[in-house]
Amino acid sequence: MNRLLVEQAAHRAGIELSVGMTEQVCEFIELLKETNDKINLTAITDDEAIATLHLEDSWRVSAHIPENATLIDIGTGAGFPGLALRIVRPDLDVTLVDATLKKVTFLQKVIDLLELDATTALHARAEDLGRDQDFRDCYDVAVARAVTALPVLSELCLPLVKRGGRLIAMKGSDDQTAQSKRAIRMLGGELEEVIRYELPGMDWPRSLVIISKKEMTAFRYPRRMVTIRNSPL
């Protein structure tokens, strides 16, 4: 991985990298590219695109995560944004969740390679974790990137967030907030703000939808995934 591209992406995202962090990011991406030749982790394989569309995009979330936060990344895939954030934010306690075992196995290899503490890769589904008392109401921040529509994502993620915490949904030019107001309110959330930004080489803006958890989510949520999909809030 080209170190200069990593450093430039970090600078644009307002991240100050140490030498050690830069090395860890490069090791992470090299293992990603090597593993991607065997299993499909990402369609983005060019260094410049990885630096912008994966790393910079992930790091844009950092400014909205408090220090020493517990963070859960739902549908993390190859580790974006959660693992990319953990490398540059060693104060975070991060749980990476994905329903695909091959991806979780890859994430564990990265965690072991980089000797990252306070970092867990978990093979699970968000709707199951939301009904598990070991995970429900446990996190300061939940993040998710390009997982599903915002009403569905809110039902999957807000039950995992502590009262007073927040969900940060990473969206594209359509922030999907207009059709999500009812769902957010029913789940105990409140739309805090929508932050728009642009990435180099992209013709459309990105959005960070920040939702505050104001009230405890009713125990009937999250519902089973088939119900969520057939009857979104």
Image: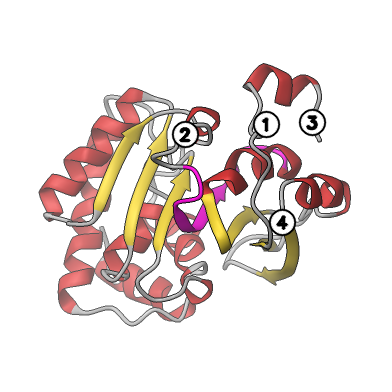
**At 17% from the left edge and 56% from the top edge, which residue is drawn?**
116
The stretch drawn in magenta includes residue 3:
no
Between 209 and 84, the one lying in front of the other is 209
The stretch drawn in magenta includes residue 139:
yes
Cβ atoms at labels 2 and 3 below 8 Å apart: no
Amino acid on which disc 3 is placed = Pro
Which sits earlier in the primary sequence, circle 1 or circle 3? Answer: 1
- Foreground mark, 1 or 2, reads 1
Left or right: 125 in relation to 104 = right
**Secondary element at image label 2:** helix
Q: What residue did someone put label 1 on?
A: 220
Please tell me the numbered disc located at residue 129. Answer: 2
Instruction: Look at the picture and state if 133 lies above or below 228.
Output: below
Please tell me the numbered disc located at residue 172. Answer: none
Amino acid on which disc 1 is placed = Arg
Q: What residue did someone put label 4 on?
A: 189
Cβ atoms at labels 1 and 2 below 8 Å apart: no
Q: What residue did someone put label 3 on?
A: 232
* Residue 94, percent from left and from top: 34, 54
* Residue 197, percent from left and from top: 65, 71
Q: CA distance from mark 2 to mark 4?
A: 18 Å
Which sits earlier in the primary sequence, circle 1 or circle 4? Answer: 4
**How would you rate the neighbour count of disc 1 (Cα within 10 Å): few for under 14, some for 14-19, many for 20 or more?**
few
Cβ atoms at labels 2 and 4 below 8 Å apart: no
**How would you rate the neighbour count of disc 3 (Cα within 10 Å): few for under 14, some for 14-19, many for 20 or more?**
some
Q: CA distance from mark 1 to mark 2?
A: 13 Å
